[in-house]
Amino acid sequence: MPTLIFDCDGVLADTEQFGHLPAFNRTFEEFSVPVHWSVDDYAEKVKIGGGKERMRSILTDDVSSQLGLHDDDAKDTAILAWHKRKTAIYTDLVDGGVMPARRGIARLVQEAHDAGWGLAVASTSAEPAVRAVLTHAVGKELAAHFAVFAGDVVPRKKPAPDIYLLALEDLGLSTDDVVVVEDSSNGLRAAVAAGLRTAVTVSSFTRSEDFTGASLVVTSLGDPGEAAEVLASPLGVEVDDVVSLSTLQQLLDSPSVTTHPEAS
């Protein structure tokens, strides 16, 4: 069965700048962590797959000393507490409607569901946060049809292909059954390393990244009256204003493109 697998952050909604960033900063403030990320700071942090991994990156010797975190067990315990609170703050922001769905998401998901395609999300974010964004982006009824692979279900985060390999195995799919929608180079590298055709919808933090290996790169999925702009189409697939199910079927019918040089 053809299946459409979405990343979450930056794909379903523009969550990074308006959700994750303020949630990280509020968490740091509540736990008296002497860190506050600017938008420019966070543009670098999003290159790290996983929220707990981003938090771990702040634990320099100086910060660890200030917080009294003198060994790995203490750091692990602190990060778990921080991340649990950050997820709760983020979920509240999602429920508050501050992050609208990205253009074309609800339309394409409805089209895929009506045609009998499988639907899934594969994300390095925590599962409660992913489900909250998904429900907000496509509605409760359509969200119920998604398989969700998220958080710590695999040992290695993107750009490793683990989460996509798990989805393929769990759903009983071959690589020729699946189109992935990603927004970042890390996500693209994960998908193509798993052998999957990938459409990239660039987001506010990722437009300048390297998307070598993508089957299609667009500004968004597009909606009537709000057309998608094609940035790269190495397979020669044309987009008439919106990325439709027909567009994705053309990707499935085409040979895969060269693997990203850094895919691993």
Image (cartoon, rainbow, N blue to C red):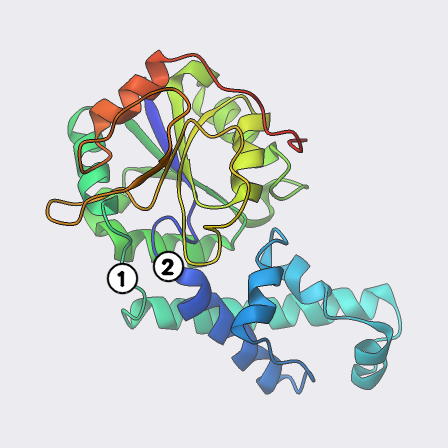
The percent coordinates of residue 54 (x first, y second) are 65, 62
Q: In the displayed structure, would residue 146 be above or below residue 84? A: above
Question: Of 229 and 131, which appears nearest the observer?
Answer: 229
- Gap in angstroms between the C-alphas marked 1 and 2: 7 Å
What is the three-letter code of the residue carrying label 2? Answer: Asp
- Where residue 143 sits in the image (x, y, percent)? 27, 45
Name the residue carrying label 2: 14
Give the numbered dot on residue 100: 1
Q: Is the residue under label 2 in contact with that under label 1 (CB below 8 Å)?
A: yes
Callout 1: SS: loop
In the displayed structure, does residue 112 sit left or right of residue 170? left
Image coordinates of residue 124 in percent, x first then y, are 54, 48
Please identify the quadrant where the C terminus is shown. Answer: top right
Q: How many marks?
A: 2
Q: Badge 1, how many Cα within 10 Å: few under 14, some, many 20+?
A: some
Q: Earlier in the sequence, mark 1 or mark 2?
A: 2
Of residue 237 and residue 12, the one placed in the foreground of this image is: 237
Q: Which residue is drawn at 55% across and 73% down?
A: 24
On screen, residue 168 above or below 222:
above
Q: Which residue is drawn at 84% across and 79% down?
A: 62
Write down the quadrant of residue 172 in the picture.
Answer: top left
x and y percent of residue 256 in the render?
47, 16
